[in-house]
Image (cartoon, rainbow, N blue to C red):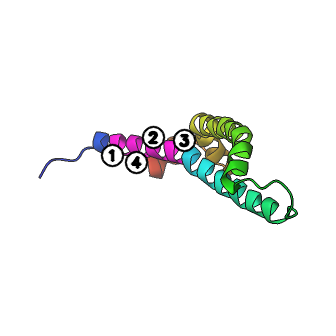
Amino acid sequence: MPKITTYDFIESNTRKTIFLFLLFPISLSILIYLGILYVSLLRLENMPRGAFQVSVFTLANQTAMYVLPIVSIIAILWILVSYYLGQHFILATTKAVELTKQNAPEVVKL
């Protein structure tokens, strides 16, 4: 049985983090497109029968062409903020302080 080290866990967590960072904008784009598709379907159902009829997908694609780039930019900014500042948000939320020998000698001994 191979010996598992801390570096193996670090490498595994790095791979999982990259996977999640890639999965977020993709899943967000899919959800936004499904929402656009649903709204397009509702818009077409409310059109009068004599009006020019277009496909639901055509209408959704025309809308998505303008919406998805904006959503992608927001998702990329969200990823960058959470990657570089996420640790600070969590530490501030939990009011964490650094453990030293002066403020927690019993923990530092462990």
Cα–Cα gap, marks 2 and 1: 14 Å
Pick whichever, 34 or 6, lies toward us.
34
Looking at numbered disc 1 in the image, what kind of residue is underneath it?
Answer: Phe
Q: Earlier in the sequence, mark 2 or mark 1?
A: 1
Q: Position of residue 92 (x, y in %)?
A: 67, 45
Look at the numbered discs 2 and 4 and tell me whether their residues touch, using CB distance below 8 Å: no
The answer to whether residue 94 shows anywhere in this view is: no
- Where does label 1 land, which residue? 9
CA gap between label 3 and label 4 equals 12 Å
Disc 4: which residue: 109
Residue at 72 percent of width and 43 percent of height: 62
Give the number of the mark in front: 3 or 2: 2
Q: Is residue 32 left or right of residue 40?
A: left
| Separation of residues labelled 3 and 1 (CA atoms) | 31 Å
Q: Which kind of residue does numbered mark 3 sit on? A: Gln
- Specify whether residue 21 is painted magenta: yes
Marks 3 and 2, how far apart in space?
38 Å
**Contact check, label 2 and label 1, Cβ < 8 Å:** no
